Amino acid sequence: MNQLDRLRSQLAALDDGHLRRHRRNNDLPCAPHARVDGRDMLAFCSNDYLGLAGEPLLADALADGARRWGSGSGASHLVSGHYTVQEALEARLAAFVGCARALYFSTGYMANSGVIPALVGRGDAVFADRLNHASLVDGMLLSRADLHRYPHLDLNALAHMLESSSAQRKLIVSDTVFSMDGDIAPLADLLQLAERHDAWLMVDDAHGFGVLGPQGRGAAAEAGLAHWRLIQVGTLGKAAGVYGAFVAGEQDVIEWLMQKTRSYIFTTGSPPALAHTLLAAIEQIEHGDSRRAHLQALISRLREGLSLQRWQLLPSRTPIQPVQIGDNAEALAVAQALWAEGLWVPAIRPPTVPVGTARLRISLSAAHQMADVDRLIKALNRLEHIR
Ligand code: PMP
């Protein structure tokens, strides 16, 4: 068997395990309406929680930004690809989440995978929730620090691990809102543990920024937390409706990250037009209480309307509302049955979630109407009954 034959048999094995992923080509602008292969679909899969990705004001800002700054930054930030508008965005983001300074990244994946190795290295220790996002896991692996992964939200286990570590530099890392479960980490307790054990606490607020906290300032603001130990990552392609990410924290911490984060230093700066668009997006988030109120009403409606017995609606007060089905093939079959009815809900299977916990990941957006959620409720209640 040559290398190509070996790769092909590995691909075939993905099919056998129902693990092969497929992309669908959408012809319409962002959620919740989509058109795939000529079929109109109602989508429950986007992270555009506030419905900003389709907001005409932001499209205008993007076009205006492109006219003013062109299409690209031309170089990495530390060479000549850093612009005043990006500096202004960083200041706005820092103030918005209650930190001294922020560093703007091209993506959340780059922020997470780069920041961890900038903070810890060989001989240091990272403590991470088992359900953290893959980008955090990759950052941990790249750092070469000793890895301690604690069971999901098990702070006793975490405390035990911290106590038995003799590493000088310690870093606790957690998602705020867990992306496949929708539940929220107890940030105040995590910060207390970080204090007691002289550790950094890095939180990934990808799914909380814009949604949680007063005016959407995020999970740390919701918990009323501010501390030099706390390093907040936020992503800007979800509730903010654009693209990018940021890391916010104490002044010197951010300076250190700017000096040391390889995924920041060795990449082309993102187009300045995006920063211009993001400034408008933050404005929309800040004044987005009615969007957040509508989103909460949709979440309540879904949770009250689903009457599942065999499947399980996981506990979550965020726009991520997973229905756990368990078996990979069944989860896929349910997603396909929904698809046949014009409802686009992704089945999430291992390795994205633990084996035996395949699920539908319903995500709600302020762009949904109440009637959209009612349609989904009806379909799911009926399908559980039939299958
Ligand atoms: N963190 C979490 C929790 C995420 O869900 C994601 C994206 N799905 C990321 C980080 C990565 O962010 P980005 O898409 O901006 O790379």
Image: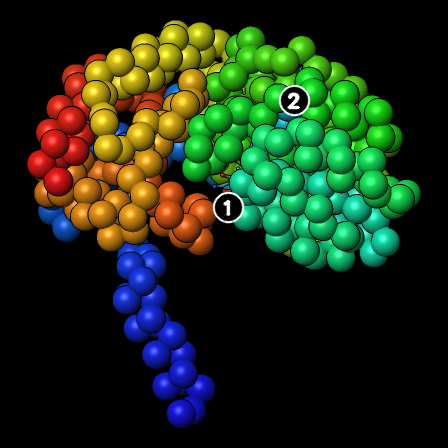
Q: Which residue is mark 1?
A: 71
Residue 181 position (above or below residue 93): below
Residue 132 visible here: no
Instruction: Determine whether, in the image, residue 52 is placed left or right of residue 174.
Output: left
What's the CA distance linking mark 2 and mark 1? 39 Å
SS category of the residue bearing label 1? loop
Q: Nearer the viewer, residue 369 or 86?
A: 369
Secondary structure category for the residue under label 2: helix
Give the labeled residue for mark 2.
Answer: 187
Question: What's the amino acid at mark 2?
Answer: Leu
The location of residue 270, given as percent across then percent down, is 58, 44
Q: Position of residue 305 (x, y in %)?
A: 22, 16
Task: In the rendered view, tell whether residue 379 sits above or below residue 272.
Answer: above
Q: Residue at x 44, y 53 (%)?
A: 351
Residue 339: which numbered mark, if any? none
The three-letter amino acid code for the residue at tag 1 is Ser
